[in-house]
Amino acid sequence: MKLGVFMSDFRGGSDVLDRLSAEKLGIILVGNGIYHATTKENGKSSPLLNKSANFYVLSEDLESRGFSPADVDSRVKPVTYSDVVDLIFNDYEKIIWI
Amino acid sequence: MAITKLAFIVRSLPYKTEASRLALTHAIASQTVEIYLEDGDNVEPVLCFIGDGVLNCLKSQQAGKYYGITSLEQHVKNSLLLDLKVMICKEDVDRFGIKEDHLVMDAEDIGGDTKAQLVPYSEIQKVMEEVNHLQFF
């Protein structure tokens, strides 16, 4: 299964993500999920980014919160709304939102 | 004559929910309550950002451009413009590795004189003990 996961929380949802497995997993960080890509706590990146997955972050949500693509962890690719549409239609068979 | 002290404690992240926006708009609105009070009575609001809430105070928020709404950055500035006491927890700012120049610490660009204060949590705790009403958002 090729699974795309929208992650819109910073503090919740990681427990669900930990149990998900897929042949191809894409995690799209949106809303408050963008803090996983930009924020280090006590110098450490979000543990979410250690998961084996392709990570994307929505630029619009990033910039709304005062960040720029330069602030994004190197494991995460900034994408626009239209890139997300392409991901949904071309790269993943199923999409969930947590 | 009595002063009622109010603390608005913001611990929520911006935008996904209205919580932090409500804290700021309520704190700002509390400045107008004077017209309903007896002579000599007043309220004294304090706005404190703790935990994830400090991320409301980041500069360069472009919520107007993408969401069509005023940014929390602008609300913080409006609070300072109205001379509200704004305190930001230093331990939490440090925990996220945020530099002070990335935070909204003043509203000089819109004519405000009051500055936000970066303070240890113990000072915010002291505020919470001193106020008459404590509200978490």
Image (cartoon, coloured by chain):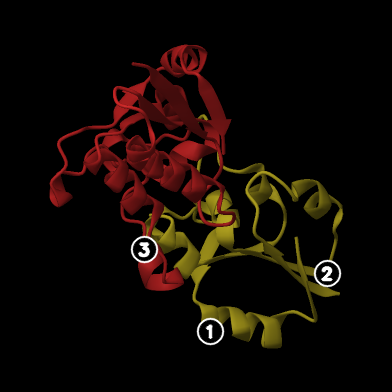
Q: CA gap, disc 1 to disc 3? A: 19 Å
- Look at label 2 and name its amino acid: Glu
Mark 1, Cα crowd under 10 Å, few <14 / some 14-19 / many 20+, is: few
Q: CA gap, disc 1 to disc 2? A: 24 Å
| Residue A59 vertical position relative to residue B35 in the rendered view, above or below | below
- Look at label 3 and name its amino acid: Gln
Task: Please identify, in this view, whether the residue under mark 1 or under mark 2 is nearer the observer.
Answer: 1
Q: Is residue A41 visible?
A: no
Dot 3: element: loop
Task: Kindly indicate whether the residues beneath marks 2 and 3 are on one polypeptide chain.
Answer: no
Chain letter for the yellow part: A
* Mark 1 vs 2, N-terminal side: 2
Residue A79, percent from left and from top: 51, 73
Q: Residue furthest front?
A: B38
Q: Is B79 left, or right, of B72 in this rendering?
A: left
- Look at label 1 and name its amino acid: Ser
Residue B74, percent from left and from top: 32, 53
Mark 2, Cα crowd under 10 Å, few <14 / some 14-19 / many 20+, is: few
Tag 1 residue: A82
Dot 2: element: loop
Q: Which residue: 39% across, 44% down?
A: B29
Q: Is B134 left, or right, of B117 in this rendering?
A: right
Tag 3 residue: B62
Q: Which residue: 28% across, 46% down?
A: B77
Tag 2 residue: A23
Colour of chain B as rendered? red
